[in-house]
Amino acid sequence: MRTGRPTPPLTLTADERQTLERWTRRPSTTQALAQRARLILSCAAGKTNTRVAQELRITKQTVGRWRMRFVADRLDGLLDEPRPGAPRTVTDAQIEAVLTRTLESRPADATHWSTRSMAKAAGLSRSTINRIWRAFALQPHRTETFKLSKDPLFIEKVRDIVGLYLHPPDRALVLCVDEKSQIQALDRTQPLLPLRPGQPERRSHDYVRHGTTSLFAALDARTGQVIGQVHRRHRAIEFRKFLETIDAAVPAELGVHLILELRHPQDAPHSSLARPASPLSSALHSDQRLLAQPRGALVCLADGETDQAGRSSQYPCAGGGDPRVHRRE
């Protein structure tokens, strides 16, 4: 004669079986819920609680508890019950109001919302505003910049410049030239105290200005070598001197492609830079020609071609006769 608590019968509908099997296979299902689903499927197959406990390596009491909960509440009985704690105080409508105000408005006395100003406007605490912004990845204090080019030949120019960096011509040198003006020459009012064991280097908080200086630099795109020069003033004369420095540093048998930007084209008139007899022409190799473009960079043209202003080329570009435009706008 069988003794003990009787086992309640357990039968599954087609939808319940499909749901339980999906829970056991789905990667996002928690391990606890997947184990309960396997437990109910084994019990529905006619196995005893002892056999199910041995297969799943759990206690018989655990099998019996989840079996009774499933019989009473079906699939909802396998889910975790709500945890104890304080009830929710922030409603979905309040969260939506905070998000709408953050995305579609600005405070009257500031450029962007802060946690304090938003908490005061929404009637919530700062910590609540912070949690809402973190949950939706909102950072009103951060901004990023972008620029859209209106040049119809922008894609062709980008391909030209990037291709020149990646695949430079044979027996030619690609140099990226840039300038940094108004560099402050500062010095401390007192000598530095040297580094000692347990004590960092120390310097006075105040400083003395010694004017400004300008830096011209040319980066070799292939080797990473930098040709640099510092001048007291920032004019076309100093730029021509820097070109002479590049000419002296580059072997005469190599062609040169310069990719640079004229920040102050009014200091370097187009006619003076384009004349073959100008100091700029004598400072460059004879196999290249550079012309100043307004609000742009220097343009290298093929031999015999003309630019948009109608100036004809007298010096071919390095590496062949293909017209190459190396410009940054």
Image (cartoon, helix red, strand yellow):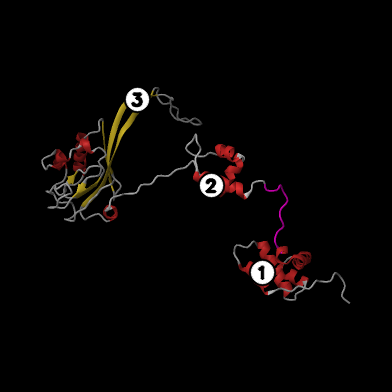
Label 2 vs 1, first from the N-terminus: 1
Determine which residue is flagged by label 1: 20
| Residue 162: % across, % down | 29, 53
Label 3 vs 1, first from the N-terminus: 1
Residue drawn at point x = 25 percent, y = 33 percent: 234
Q: Are marks 3 and 2 in contact (CB under 8 Å)?
A: no
Mark 2 belongs to which amino acid? Answer: Thr
185 with respect to 193 (left or right): left
Count residues near mark 1 (Cα–Cα under 10 Å), then give few for <14, some for 14-19, many for 20+: many
Is 250 colored magenta in this rendering? Answer: no
| Residue 62: % across, % down | 76, 64
Q: Which residues are magenta?
A: 78-88
Q: Are marks 3 and 1 in contact (CB under 8 Å)?
A: no
Determine which residue is flagged by label 3: 209
Residue drawn at point x = 70 percent, y = 74 percent: 13
Mark 1 belongs to which amino acid? Answer: Leu
Residue 133 in view in this figure:
no
Q: Is residue 260 above or below residue 237?
A: below
Determine which residue is flagged by label 2: 100
150 with respect to 305 (left or right): right
| Residue 202: % across, % down | 45, 27
Q: Main secondary structure of the magenta part?
A: loop
Spatial separation of the CA atoms under disc 3 and disc 2 = 50 Å
Is 86 colored magenta in this rendering? Answer: yes
Q: Secondary structure at mark 3?
A: strand
As rendered, which of 235 and 188 lies closer to the eye? 235
- Of tags 3 and 2, the one toward the viewer is 2
Q: Secondary structure at mark 1?
A: helix
For the N terminus, the image quarter is: bottom right
Residue drawn at point x = 29 percent, y = 55 percent: 155
